[in-house]
């Protein structure tokens, strides 16, 4: 079974926290020309109160043609090489990582007011920490409306979440504590926090 049971993450709060910290989704969508998927990368914002991801893409993006279809959103957290020296030679060389997959249904938004609301939510969220904070209302309304005609606004409703957090869970608590300490000393704190 892959991933092994000890690397599977089912805690929805941990999955959503990773998505919030690393919002760039690789989205796999159906491809009519082959058995493989088309892939695009899109920053998304998850709204827990409504259980939806919101995003926008260019009109010519293949995702804009996936209304009412199911897609898979893949999120990757930080990752790093695990040297045996991090565990006093109690592990083999490996790789540490965390990832989340969400299967979701696509809903293309047609209402102009909803498009504007999504754009406001996305920009106000991703502008946090910038000074001055840019607002979509800095763009004149007529220009915004013209810009929105070039974009597709999307809500993704997740139907299934899963996570793969490969963080040496198959090792003893002592070995894991030593790895965590080594990660912190190596300034790999975002991974160490997951231990």
Image (tube, rainbow, N blue to C red):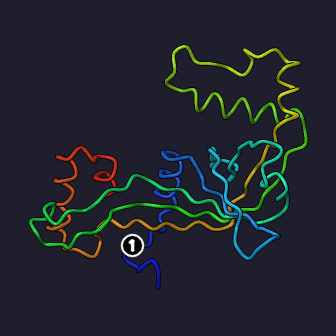
In this figure, which residue is indicated by the disc labeled 1? 7
Left-right relation of 145 to 29: right
Position of residue 86 measured from the top left corner of the image (x, y, whole percent): 16, 60
In this view, the residue in front, 45 or 182, is 182
Q: Quadrant of residue 151?
A: top right
**Residue 84 rendering spot, x and y as whole percentages:** 16, 66
- Is 177 drawn above or below residue 54 in the view shown? below
Residue at image position (37%, 76%) is 6
Q: Quadrant of the C terminus?
A: bottom left
Is 29 drawn above or below residue 8 in the view shown?
Answer: above
Q: Secondary structure at mark 1?
A: helix
**Horizontal and vertical percent position of residue 67:** 85, 57
Residue 79 lies, in percent from the top left, at: 37, 56
Along the line of sight, which residue is nearer the eye, 135 or 57? 57
Q: In the current view of this chain or complex, which residue is farthest to the bottom? A: 1
**In the visual, does 154 lie left or right of 112?**
left
* In front of the other: 193 or 67: 67
Residue drawn at point x = 20 percent, y = 65 percent: 176
């Amino acid at each position: 079974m892959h991933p092994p049971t000890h690397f599977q993450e089912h805690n929805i709060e941990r999955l959503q926290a990773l998505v919030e910290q690393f919002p760039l989704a690789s989205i796999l969508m159906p491809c009519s020309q082959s058995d493989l998927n088309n892939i695009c990368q899109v920053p998304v914002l998850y709204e827990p109160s409504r259980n939806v991801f919101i995003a926008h893409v260019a009109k010519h993006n293949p995702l804009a043609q996936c209304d009412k279809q199911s897609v898979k959103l893949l999120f990757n957290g930080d990752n790093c090489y695990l040297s045996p020296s991090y565990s006093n030679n109690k592990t083999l060389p490996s790789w540490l990582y965390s990832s989340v997959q969400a299967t979701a249904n696509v809903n293309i938004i047609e209402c102009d007011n909803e498009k504007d609301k999504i754009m406001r939510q996305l920009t106000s969220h991703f502008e946090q920490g910038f000074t001055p904070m840019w607002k979509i209302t800095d763009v004149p309304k007529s220009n915004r409306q013209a810009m929105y005609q070039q974009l597709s606004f999307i809500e993704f409703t997740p139907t299934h979440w899963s996570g793969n957090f490969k963080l040496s869970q198959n090792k003893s608590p002592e070995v894991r504590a030593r790895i965590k300490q080594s990660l912190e000393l190596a300034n790999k704190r975002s991974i160490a926090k997951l231990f």
